[in-house]
Image (cartoon, grey):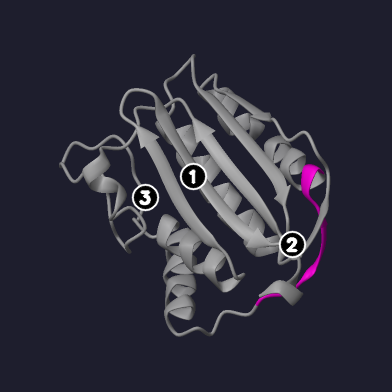
Amino acid sequence: ITLVNDLLDAQKLDLKKIKFSYENIDVVYLLDSLISNISNIAKQKNAEIVNSSEQNFIIESDRNRLEQVLNNLIYNAIDFVPKFTGRIEINATKNHSAAIFYVKDNGPGIEPTKNKDIFKKFYQTDTSATRKHGGSGLGLSICQGIVEGLGGKIWVESEVGKGTTFYFKIPLSSKHI
């Protein structure tokens, strides 16, 4: 079901047919809710997940699509952090007319040569037959499409052996799109 939904979302994004439903969202409440919903999955790997946001603010955006992006980034982080010592930090800050979110992990990091392709559809950093991490290769592409559809941008910073941070920036209000 997830794969079919991902394929449908990817198709809608390609055709620019995805609809967004804007509402006011309390950012800290949103992040805390995501952590609460995902905490059991993180506990299975004994990974710590924290919201390090220091300021609370309201944005006008599509809650379901924003959750979809954040969930995808958090699930990816859980998948890649080391068992027992995994740490995932999520954060949101207000910057002028935009909100900047990030999901940071202490996983293995991504080779610099692979960063440029990471948002391509069906891209996998590990293409070997014995790869440890599943997925369709659509998640980050869908994240990019949603973030751009909300008027923002997404990017990654990573250092091999130290971890990866996915950032995205979206307008505080649909009026800024």
Residue at screen point 58% across, 43% down? 102
Left or right position of 159 against 50: left
141 in the magenta segment: no
| C-alpha distance separating marks 1 and 3 | 18 Å
Provide the residue designation for mark 3. 135
Q: Position of residue 30 (x, y in %)?
A: 76, 47
23 in the magenta segment: yes
Q: Nearer the viewer, residue 170 or 63?
A: 170
Provide the residue designation for mark 1. 166
Badge 3 density bin: few <14, some 14–19, many ≥20, Cα 10 Å? few
Q: Nearer the viewer, mark 2 or mark 3?
A: 2
Tell me the kind of residue under disc 1: Phe
Q: Nearer the viewer, mark 2 or mark 1?
A: 2
Residue 14 visible: yes
Q: Quadrant of residue 176?
A: bottom right
- Outermost top residue: 84
Tell me the kind of residue under disc 2: Leu
